[in-house]
Image (cartoon, helix red, strand yellow):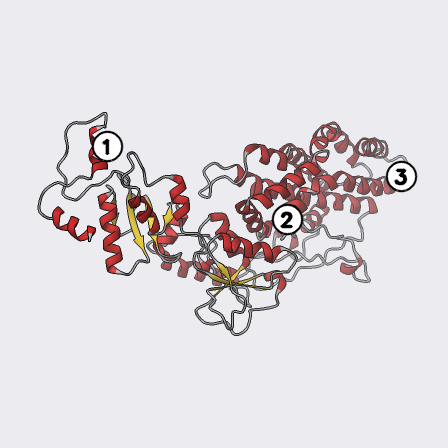
């Protein structure tokens, strides 16, 4: 065969050049003679490339690959070192695959080498040709047979199946009877782990599926293992993290620290310690301690006992073994005006946190040019979707600071909320129209990009699973600025009603002006 005869010739001690390689040397601007070589060189198509193999077990196949790579000027390393430029992988498993995926190193199948070899007669051809790399890349679900469990049939499952097939996998219709490599579970649609799953089948959260598409490589299944019991405390948080020396020792140490923390919960914050008189500022801190996506009525009947004493129910910190025994705080001495203002401060805090989430979780990552996965949107699309959100966040952060300062030094007969609102009224009038008036355009652009760009859609799905988002979509979060001013108006109406009951209160006129400006 061609391989055998050329190998014999190369072992005779003579330099062997192919026609393509010889012409490329002679046409080079830096030609300084024909160098002596110790392997056949037919082309420079892989010159400067360093390859590493993963998952290939057949010795003869590997020998053919090695001969082709060397004959095209490339090099091969047994271990995955930092200088490796391409990973040639037979599947989507193993440490080498994880490392390459983490650091954005191209992962291709052996077909890449064969197709490059077929083009060895082309002068100037390079194996890094983007079209060839894309044609031969190892897709995230290459060879996977996936069953979707609990995914609603509202178009979502159909889309997931379509993305699965586009990324090299196929759907398993019955995981009990057919071969099944992965069982993807939608946590919101099931009550527990599916029964009768084979031991070799990965049972993973749906987040694994979307992260794999977003990263354009198969995510580590261990990071997204699904079980009936919540194991988030003892499971690693890093996606696609390569193994590093000493990582097992650190994991054991981290687990020990977590278990110690569970056994010794943090002490109560100072303002909740028994024997200390509660203040209005303390109440505000309590009311803001829960999820920022919740805006509960902190004066609702469900949390008030017959004596008029409210029992705050703060969300326990992550990792707490149990909710601390929180002493009851008496809010019955608060005036109705003070109660409504406390609710205004709480909802303002929630709103500011929502804006921060939109920017930190969605906007900034999309604008980051250094992302391993590359960019999902062009600058124009990003601008249309997010509009002028940063100025709105800056404005409300300042308002929240002033509200909080007033609440901490509250005096029922003298505290003026209207003055703060009038201070920012003109800025509110300037800042909101560019966002509110173009919200439908933003929403349509977001929907079109999600439909046309699978990796952007996957990015949105991954972000939605983060605790900061409370499982709300970006569209649901982006509508909050549209709703905020009407919400403030309703609370100001209540404030004004209670303020007017207090004769000659200094806040009445300012509240009336502020309400008029916000409504106009």
| Residue in view at x 67 percent, y 42 percent | 478
Q: Earlier in the sequence, mark 1 or mark 3?
A: 1
Q: How far apart are marks 1 and 3 (CA)?
A: 90 Å
Secondary structure found at label 3:
helix
254 up-or-down from 201: above or below? above
Q: Position of residue 39 (x, y in %)?
A: 16, 44
Asked whether the viewer can see residue 353, the reply is no
Task: Determine contact: label 2, label 3, CB under 8 Å.
Answer: no
Q: Which picture quadrant has residue 83?
A: top left
Q: Which of marks 2 and 3 is nearer the N terminus?
A: 2
> Which of 30 and 288 lies nearest the eye of the viewer?
30
Label 3 environment density (alpha carbons within 10 Å; few <14, some 14–19, many ≥20): some
Kindly identify which numbered label has been placed on residue 24: 1
Q: Position of residue 365 (x, y in %)?
A: 52, 41
Side of 292 relative to 236 (left or right): right
Residue at the disc numbered 3: 500
Q: Which picture quadrant has residue 153?
A: bottom right
Kindly identify which numbered label has been placed on residue 473: 2
Pair 2/1: label in front: 1
């Amino acid at each position: 065969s061609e391989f055998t005869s050329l190998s014999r010739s190369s072992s005779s001690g003579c330099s062997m050049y192919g026609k393509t390689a010889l012409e490329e040397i002679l046409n080079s601007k830096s030609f300084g003679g024909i160098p002596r070589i110790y392997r056949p060189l037919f082309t420079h198509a892989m010159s400067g490339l360093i390859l590493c193999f993963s998952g290939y077990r057949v010795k003869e196949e590997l020998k053919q690959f090695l001969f082709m790579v060397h004959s095209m000027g490339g090099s091969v390393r047994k271990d995955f070192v930092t200088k490796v430029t391409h990973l040639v992988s037979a599947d989507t498993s193993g440490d080498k695959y994880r490392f390459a995926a983490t650091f954005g190193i191209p992962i291709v199948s052996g077909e890449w080498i064969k197709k490059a070899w077929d083009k060895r007669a082309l002068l100037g051809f390079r194996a890094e040709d983007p079209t060839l790399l894309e044609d031969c890349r190892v897709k995230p679900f290459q060879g996977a047979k996936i069953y979707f469990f609990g995914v609603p049939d509202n178009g979502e499952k159909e889309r997931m199946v379509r993305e699965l097939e586009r990324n090299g996998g196929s759907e398993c219709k019955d995981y009990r009877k057919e071969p099944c490599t992965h069982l993807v579970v939608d946590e919101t649609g099931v009550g527990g782990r599916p029964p009768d799953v084979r031991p070799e089948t990965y049972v993973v959260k749906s987040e694994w599926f979307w992260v794999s598409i977003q990263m354009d490589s198969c995510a580590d299944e261990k990071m997204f293992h699904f079980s009936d019991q919540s194991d988030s405390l003892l499971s690693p948080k890093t996606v696609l993290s390569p193994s590093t020396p000493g990582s097992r020792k650190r994991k054991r140490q981290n687990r020990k620290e977590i278990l110690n923390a569970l056994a010794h919960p943090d002490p109560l914050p100072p303002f909740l310690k028994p024997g200390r008189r509660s203040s209005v500022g303390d109440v505000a801190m309590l009311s803001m301690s829960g999820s920022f996506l919740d805006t509960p009525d902190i004066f609702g009947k469900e949390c008030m006992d017959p004596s008029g004493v409210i029992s705050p129910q703060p969300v326990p910190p992550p990792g707490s073994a149990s909710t601390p025994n929180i002493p009851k705080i008496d809010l019955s001495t608060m005036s109705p005006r003070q109660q409504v203002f406390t609710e205004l401060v709480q909802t303002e805090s929630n709103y500011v946190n929502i804006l921060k989430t939109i920017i930190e979780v969605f906007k900034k990552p999309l604008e980051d040019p250094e992302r391993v996965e590359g960019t999902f949107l062009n600058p124009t699309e990003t601008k249309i979707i997010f509009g002028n959100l940063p100025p709105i966040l800056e404005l409300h952060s300042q308002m929240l600071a002033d509200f909080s300062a007033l609440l901490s030094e509250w005096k029922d007969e003298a505290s003026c909320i209207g003055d703060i609102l009038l201070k920012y009224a003109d800025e509110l009038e300037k800042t909101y129209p560019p966002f509110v008036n173009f919200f439908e355009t933003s929403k349509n652009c977001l929907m079109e990009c999600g439909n046309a760009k699978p990796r952007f859609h996957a990015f949105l799905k991954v972000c939605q699973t983060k605790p900061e988002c409370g499982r709300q979509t970006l569209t649901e979060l982006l509508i909050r600025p549209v709703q905020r001013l009407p919400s403030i108006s309703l609370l100001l109406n209540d404030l004004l009603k209670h303020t007017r009951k207090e004769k000659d209160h200094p806040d009445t006129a300012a509240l009336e002006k502020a309400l008029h400006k916000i409504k106009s």
